[in-house]
């Protein structure tokens, strides 16, 4: 609901007021920053100490060692492939959903076919890479800290061994503000949720999430250079 209101009410309204594209972009990424605040507030409300070791333990960010790296790379490959495969196989359905619930043009203009970003021409503007990295960090790490770090262990207290199903479906529904994206997210969400519960290590999902969301970053970099 937060993203839905932000994308379809707040940002279009600000655009009508003539607010700059840069301010609109900062408005767009503000919910991701809020995720950090919510997760850390919840962490502290549980009575946990303010130190890095305790925070990593509570949020289950564990190191990946030895052969586990091979498994992690395999999991990431499967997750990425499932997203792309659903897009390819279900493209007619995805397109119908997108056409029925289109993203407001003012939001899509943030990155228009790789030619513009946040209202600025991409070619040769290296500073836009830094701007995108802010979005990339807040998006990936913000969502992971809240969803996998803070919420997942609490969900396990109620749902036990079925947490991966509940969490996977909730993670998919979280993307319903862009319904066409939710269709592509579902298989990978369930798969990676199962892997996360199996290994009790949120670092795996973090790496997969960073990989998927890194595709637009690579595209932006290529357009800056090109």
Image: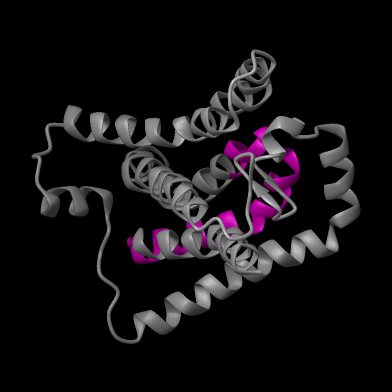
Task: Locate residue 49 relative to residue 25 in the image: left or right.
Answer: left
Tell me, yes or no, whether the highlighted magenta stretch contains residue 155. Answer: no
User: Looking at the picture, how far across and down is residue 179, in whole percent?
Assistant: 73, 39
Identify which residue is drawn at 55% across, 57% down. 213
- Image quadrant containing the C terminus: bottom right
> Which residue is farthest front?
124
Residue extent of the magenta highlight: 172-201
**83 or 22, which lies in front?**
22
- Give the dominant element type of the magenta stretch: helix, strand or loop: helix
Tell me, yes or no, whether the highlighted magenta stretch contains residue 184. Answer: yes
Identify which residue is drawn at 25% across, 70% down. 63
User: Looking at the picture, how far across and down is residue 110, in whole percent?
Assistant: 64, 41
User: Looking at the picture, how far across and down is residue 121, in whole percent?
Assistant: 65, 49
**109 or 53, which lies in front?**
109
User: Looking at the picture, how far across and down is residue 112, in whole percent?
Assistant: 73, 47
Identify which residue is drawn at 49% across, 56% down. 129
122 in relation to 150, above or below: below
Identify which residue is drawn at 26% across, 30% down. 42
- Image quadrant containing the N terminus: top right
Tell me which corner region of the image, top left, top right, bottom left or bottom right, holds residue 221. Answer: bottom right
């Amino acid at each position: 609901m937060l993203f839905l209101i932000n994308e379809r009410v707040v940002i279009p309204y600000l655009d009508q007021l003539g607010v700059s594209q840069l301010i609109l972009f900062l408005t767009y990424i503000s919910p991701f920053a809020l995720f950090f605040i919510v997760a850390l507030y919840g962490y502290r409300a549980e009575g946990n100490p303010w130190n890095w070791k305790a925070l990593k333990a509570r949020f289950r960010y564990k190191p990946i060692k030895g052969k586990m790296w091979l498994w992690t790379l395999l999991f990431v490959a499967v997750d990425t492939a499932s997203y792309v495969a659903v897009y390819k196989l279900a493209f007619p359905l995805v397109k119908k959903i997108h056409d029925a619930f289109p993203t407001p043009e003012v939001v899509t203009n943030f990155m228009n076919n790789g030619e513009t970003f946040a209202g600025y021409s991409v070619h040769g503007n290296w500073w836009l890479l830094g701007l995108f990295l802010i979005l990339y960090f807040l998006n990936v790490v913000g969502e992971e800290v809240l969803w996998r770090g803070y919420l997942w262990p609490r969900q396990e207290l109620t749902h036990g061994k079925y947490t991966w199903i509940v969490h996977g479906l909730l993670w998919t529904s979280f993307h319903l503000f862009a319904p066409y994206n939710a269709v592509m997210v579902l298989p990978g969400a369930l798969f990676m949720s199962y892997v996360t519960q199996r290994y009790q290590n949120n670092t795996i999902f973090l790496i997969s999430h960073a990989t998927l969301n890194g595709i637009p970053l690579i595209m932006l970099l290529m357009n800056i250079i090109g």
